[in-house]
Image (spheres, rainbow, N blue to C red):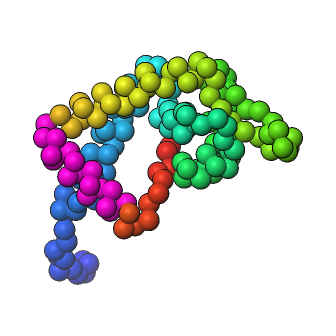
């Protein structure tokens, strides 16, 4: 005797979910930006860390981790990669020699405006079909959702 045929349960499709579309668009925008940065030998995570440092004198790795929503271990790995590229330096804290601080090098600070221009270009290309008002509305909605859910940082892969 064969298996009994179960009644087909009517369930929603992936495409019925707003979260699905948010993820699709987010992935597209993120990957487009990652490709632009790769041409400059920088990852999205490296760019984000450098942007956090921009305009700051010195920051402790724990503070960077907090702002980026990453672990201190992940920040250490990113910092090591950026040190190898001469974009940041790690220094002993003047008050406590065991503590460390991170800062951009001159080369790193000069690189930020070029990378920021790539971020601006990516946004323009990805959201070109939206009117200025629609872009503002989309940002307002997304910021509102982030606020409602208590999202204060994004973990960058």
**Residue 39, image x, y percentages:** 43, 19
**Residue 138, image x, y percentages:** 22, 51
Q: Residue at x 24, y 35 (%)?
A: 126
Say if residue 139 shows up in the picture. yes
Task: State left or right for residue 128 relative to residue 152.
Answer: left
**Residue 55, image x, y percentages:** 55, 34
Check the image and report above or below for 129 versus 106. below
* Quadrant hosting residue 32: top left
Q: Residue at x 73, y 32 (%)?
A: 90
Task: State left or right for residue 25 relative to residue 109.
Answer: left
* Quadrant holding the N terminus: bottom left
The tally of labels here is 0
Q: Residue at x 30, y 39 (%)?
A: 28
**Residue 118, image x, y percentages:** 37, 26
* Quadrant hosting residue 53: top right
The extreme right residue here reads 97
User: Is residue 91 in the magenta section?
Assistant: no
Q: Nearer the viewer, residue 5 or 40?
A: 40
Provide the major secondary structure of the magenta segment. helix
Check the image and report above or below for 3 versus 155. below
For the record, the magenta segment spans 129-146
Check the image and report above or below for 23 versus 16. above
Q: Nearer the viewer, residue 8 or 54?
A: 54
Say if residue 35 shows up in the picture. no
Q: Residue at x 57, y 23 (%)?
A: 108
User: Is residue 132 in the magenta section?
Assistant: yes
């Amino acid at each position: 005797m064969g298996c009994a045929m179960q009644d087909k349960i009517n369930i929603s499709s992936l495409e019925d979910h707003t979260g699905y579309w948010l993820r699709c668009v987010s992935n597209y925008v993120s990957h487009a930006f990652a490709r632009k940065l790769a041409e400059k030998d920088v990852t999205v995570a490296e760019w984000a860390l450098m942007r956090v440092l921009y305009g700051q004198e010195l920051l402790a790795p724990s503070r960077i981790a907090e702002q980026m929503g990453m672990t201190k271990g992940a920040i250490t790995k990113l910092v090591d990669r950026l040190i190898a590229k001469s974009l940041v330096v790690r220094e002993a804290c003047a008050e406590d020699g065991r503590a460390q601080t991170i800062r951009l090098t001159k080369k790193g600070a000069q690189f930020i405006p070029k990378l920021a221009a790539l971020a601006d270009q990516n946004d323009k290309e990805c959201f070109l079909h939206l009117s200025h008002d629609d872009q503002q509305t989309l940002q307002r909605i997304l910021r509102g959702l982030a606020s409602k859910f208590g999202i204060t940082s994004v973990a960058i892969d």
